[in-house]
Amino acid sequence: MRLVQYWDWHVGEQGWDEEEVKEMDDWEEGFFEMIGPDNMYDLFIGANYIDARGCLERGAEYVADLIRKMKVDEIREYFGMKNDFSPEEEEQLKKDYPWAYDDDDNEPVKV
């Protein structure tokens, strides 16, 4: 159902002016926030099945932007991922990649 909602917003987008494109960008941001991590996978599977490249690309961009702004623990929590590293392995990772664990700044990681 959400995929149909996304598709409906993009009907006739080739002829849109700048204001309409900005409105669509704002709507998309809210759309992917509303989907949340629990339903994002299903949305991607559906978009891939019907070859909705725009939805896949914009969804992947949204997720990448989210991850770029998060620290390791936040990513694990957001996606419900279990930490399967031993305490020793975790400490080594913190030494090797301090930028991923540093809580002092919330700046996105520069790639």
Image: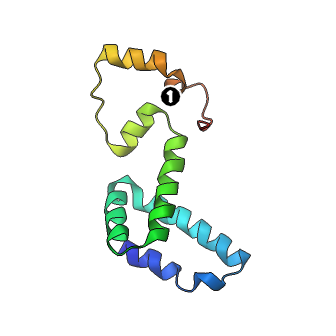
Q: Look at 40% across and 56% down and name the residue there.
A: 36
Neighbours of disc 1 within 10 Å: few (<14), some (14-19), many (20+) = some
Identified at 55% across, 62% down, the residue is 29
Q: Position of residue 56 (x, y in %)?
A: 44, 64
Picture quarter with the N terminus: bottom left
The disc labelled 1 sits on which kind of residue? Ala
Which residue corresponds to the image point at 31% horizontal and 62% vertical from the top-left? 42
**Residue placed most toward the observer, 57 or 88:** 57
Which quadrant would the C terminus be assigned to in this image? top right
80 above or below 47?
above
Q: Which residue is mark 1?
A: 100
Residue 32 in the image: x percent, y percent?
Answer: 47, 61
When the figure is inspected, residue 59 is found, relative to residue 67, above or below; the finding is below
The vertical placement of 63 against 11, above or below, is: above
Q: Is residue 105 left or right of residue 40?
A: right
How many numbered marks are there?
Answer: 1
